Structure formats: C-alpha cells, structure tokens
Image (cartoon, helix red, strand yellow):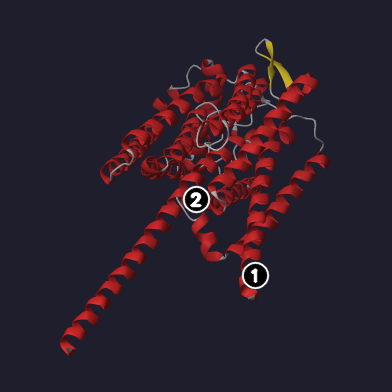
Amino acid sequence: MKRQVAQPLKDAVQTAFTMLSFALILLLVLCTPFVEMSGEVSAAQSSYRIYGYGLFGLLQIALIALRGWERSWRIFLGALTPFLVWAALSVFWTQHVDLTSKRLILLTFIFLGTFGGVCALSHERSLSILRIVLVAALVLNLITVLIAPDLGTHYMQGGHLWRGLMAHKNIAGMLCAFTVIAFTFDDIKTPLPPRLLVSAGALVFLYFSWSKTALLALPVSLMAGGVIVLIGSRKGSLSTIPRKRVVTASFAMLAVAFFALVVLTVQRDLFLSFTNDTSTLTTRGAIWRPMIQFYLDHPLLGSGYGAYWDASDTLIDPQANKELWKNVDQGHNGYLDLLVQVGLPGLMLALYAVVVWPAGVIADMIGKCPQRAALVVAILIFSLIENFSESSLLADDALGNAFLLIGLAYAHRFALRSGRRTNTGNRVDMINAAQLRSGRQERHQSLVEN
C-alpha cells in the first residue's frame, strides 16, 4: 500500500519539478538580451539571473534522482552528444578557459532544460507552457513599446524600430517569428480566434521591428511546414524507402559541405576572396574576413567553444575599423562562428545533429503526426536560414539556440516514443508467440495421452 501511494506522489513531484524547470529555462533565456544588452541592468541586479541558473541546476539534480539514471540517459543521449563532447574537449586547447567554461555551462543548461522539459512531459503540456511564455513575452513587449518607447524602441535605419524588452530589433523579430510558428502548427485544441489574435499581434510586432532576416525566413519556414502537413494528410504514411532516401540525401549534403570546406581551407586565397568587398551585406564582409583568416590558421580546433568574441582584442586585426567592431559580439553567421570556435570537425558534428539526424526522424513523423512534424520542420528551417545572417547555432543561451533545441527535442521525443512502442510491440509479439507454442504443445500432449 505504501508503495502504491508513494509512486503517484513521486510522479507528481517529478512532473511539477519538470514543469518548473522548463518554464524557468525559458524565462532565463528571454531575460538574457535585456540583462546583457539593454544597459538598464546593473551588475548587482544581473546577479539575480545567476541565482535563477543556480535554482535550475538544483532542479536538474533533483530530477535526475527522481527519474533515475536510465531514463535520464535516454532523454539526454542523442545526436547532439558528439558535438557537446567535442565542445567540452575544447577546454583543453582554448586560450580562454574561463570563457569556454562559462559558455559550456550555459549551453549544457539550455540543453538539459529544453530536452528534459520536452521529453519528460506530455507533448501537450510542454507546448502549453511554451505558448503561455510566448504570449506573456509578446504582451510585455507590446506594453513596453506603448508606455516606454525610449526603452521599447530604438532609432535605427531612419526610424524607431520596435524591440520591446528584447534589447534589439532582430532578437524581438526572431521571438515574434517563433511565436507565429508555435501557434500555426500542432495546436488543434486551442480555438482558432485566439490563435489568430496571437499570430496577428506577433506579425504586427515583427513588421515594426523590421528584422529583415526574420521577415524573410518566416514565410519560408511556414511554407515548409505547410508542405509537410499536405504530404502527411495525402499519403498518410511514408515507407522505409523514402526515409532511406531522405537520410542518404542529407548525408550527401553533409559530405558536399565537408569537401567544399576542405577545398576552401586548402585554397586560402579563394576562401578569403569571398570577402574582398568588405562593404557587402551591411558590412558583414568586414566582420567575416578576420574570422576566416583565424579559421585558416586553426582549421581543426578553432579558438575553443565560445572563446572568440570576448577575446576579440587579441584575435582581430588591430588596424581594423574600431568603430565597426565596438558593438560587435557575434559573427552574424552561425556556421562561420562555429567554424571559428570548434573547427571543421565541430561544425560537421553540429550539422549532423541539426540537419542529418532530424531528417530521418521527420520522415517517420510525417505519416504518424504531420502537424508535429510541421512544427519541427518550421522551427529548424527558420533557424537554419536565420543563421546565415545571425549567430545562434548551438550558441550557449542565445534565444535562437533555445528554440532550435526545442525543435530538436520534439524530434528526439518522437524517436524515443517510437522506439519504446516498437520494443513494446516486439515484446507483445514474443509473448503471443510463446503462448501459441505452449497451446500447441498442450494440445499435442492431450492427443498423445488420448
């Protein structure tokens, strides 16, 4: 009797801790731009964010104890593990151990929070928490723009662009885009009018933020998700052969990217020639050129995970335009940023985790739950496009990285549940077969005796 009472209580505590952990990591990620970039928070006030991460760490220790090592191992061991191991190993060759260690801890916390929340909670519950947080953020950002325009907007490109509490228009635009995606796909239970209202509010904010990358990436990601829904509704399921083709094609793309980078690494002048005109792409060429030069000098190991930008005084050409570099803390290209930090092997491991592995899982998801597959595809497509001009690809506690990991977590959750159902089905088949054999033996014995 005590065991029967203790187990539901343990499950209830575990669920409550998981919900709190998931909501807390989302709030911490959303607070990061305001704390680090707005200039409105003092050093003493920003320490409260450290306390938040400390509480999150304690929750993770408690959850591992409640779940047990075996279940926690299944949740956190996956396609991202090789990249995380490689990034952790960079501590041994980085010239800035403090920076790399700090970024690794943040990346690990975001990974634990997103994968733990998505995989340990029911699908509907984790999505509900995500959507509640997104709506709250949208409302707060709108209120900030209206009642505190000096804080909620900034003068750029000849106008006052909306940013709310996100400290920068591009971060605000990205958040709005993810809000639209979250309320477009896999949200059958919520009535249509509230979904349209939230999406309309997010689109209005996105337009007035004038975040060009988000404005370009959002329609593409929505169309990609819509195609997935159409494929799932028409075909019903995908056979093994198309799935193998998808995986083969994604591996082929990874191989092409690898050999192209190998050639460019050998042909140094060719690689650098892409940034000869440093005024292109809103001066991003001027930012990319020294990054490429650094990569060419450190092609295998890089600077160490997260150890390039905060150490830029020693890594960037001292003759460069100081005004240009004054407020630059990222490479405005997630792929190039990873290439500089973890080298070519690290970038390939990252691309495997965010492109190749999800492709095979999504191929299985389409026939069984097309709306969920559409949500994952839309998130991944948006993130992959956004990282051509912004840097959030597996970048510690960046907002874009958190949503990328959420998309990967939903794919990982599906893979876990599918594997569990398959194993359960196999066990049932084995039991039925054993019972059938036993029945035949009993009938045969009865005939012999008669």
* Residue 390 at x, y percent in the picture: 56, 29
User: At label 2, which amino acid type do we have?
Assistant: Trp
In-image side of 182 versus 252 (left or right): right
Residue at the image point whose x is 27% and y is 78% from the top: 438
Query: For the residue carrying disc 2, how many other residues have a C-alpha within 10 Å: few (<14), some (14-19), or many (20+)?
Result: some
Up the image or down, 166 lies above or below 405; here it is above
Location of the N terminus by quadrant is bottom right
Location of the C terminus by quadrant is bottom left
In-image side of 41 versus 272 (left or right): right
Quarter of the rendering containing residue 164: top right
Q: In this orientation, which residue lies closer to the viewer: 170 or 277?
A: 170
Q: Which residue is mark 1?
A: 5
In front: mark 2 or mark 1?
1
Instruction: Look at the numbered disc 2 and give the secondary structure of its residue.
Output: helix
Instruction: Look at the numbered disc 1 and give the secondary structure of its residue.
Output: helix
User: At label 1, which amino acid type do we have?
Assistant: Val
Q: Residue furthest front?
A: 450
Q: Which residue is mark 2?
A: 86
Q: Residue furthest bottom?
A: 449
Q: Earlier in the sequence, mark 2 or mark 1?
A: 1
In-image side of 15 versus 393 (left or right): right
